[in-house]
Amino acid sequence: MEKKFLNSVAILTGLLSSSLALAEDAAATSNSSVGLAKIGAAIAIGLGAFGAATGQGRAASAALEGIARNPTSRADVFVPLIIALAFMEFQALLSFMIAYMIKG
């Protein structure tokens, strides 16, 4: 599972770097960088949503597994879980804002 995750991160990083290189080339040669900015914005939203969803799934899984093993730890696990989920959701919203700014 972890190997698949690392492979997908490597592929997405390659796509992002190639789209950035294309955007630089297009900006230098012509004014067609608007289309590439939209592609970059879409990649930014995709990476942000992918990262947030993966992190939220793993955090919820670990918290529920911990509570299932020790039901008395529910109060100790719940608040840090909610805080962690809020930070992950903020990451997704931040990627949306960055993509909006890239798109112009």
Image (spheres, rainbow, N blue to C red):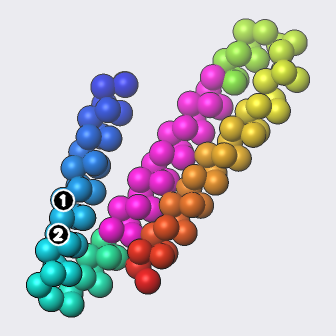
Question: According to the image, label 1 marks what residue?
Answer: 18
> Local crowd at mark 2 within 10 Å, few (<14), some, or many (≥20)?
some
> Please, what secondary structure does the residue beneath circle 2 have?
helix
- The amino acid type, in three-letter code, at marker 1 is Ser
**Dominant secondary structure of the residues highlighted in magenta in the image:** helix
Image coords of residue 78 (percent x, y): 81, 29
- At 59% from the left and 61% from the top, the residue drawn is 93
- The amino acid type, in three-letter code, at marker 2 is Leu
- At 35% from the left and 62% from the top, the residue drawn is 43
Label 2, label 1: how far apart the Cα atoms are: 6 Å
Residue 46 or residue 26, whichever sits in front: 26
Image coords of residue 71 (percent x, y): 83, 13
Q: Is residue 10 left or right of residue 88?
A: left
Occupied quadrant, residue 4: top left
Residue 54 in the image: above or below residue 90:
above
Q: Which residues are magenta?
A: 40-62
Mark 2–mark 1 contact, CB under 8 Å? yes
Image coords of residue 86 (percent x, y): 71, 47
> Please, what secondary structure does the residue beneath circle 1 have?
helix
> The N terminus lies in which quarter of the figure?
top left
- At 32% from the left and 41% from the top, the residue drawn is 9
- At 27% from the left and 57% from the top, the residue drawn is 16
Q: Is residue 51 left or right of residue 41?
A: right
Any mark on residue 22, and which?
2
Determine the residue located farthest toward the top in the rendered image: 69
> Local crowd at mark 1 within 10 Å, few (<14), some, or many (≥20)?
few
- Membership of 51 in magenta stretch: yes
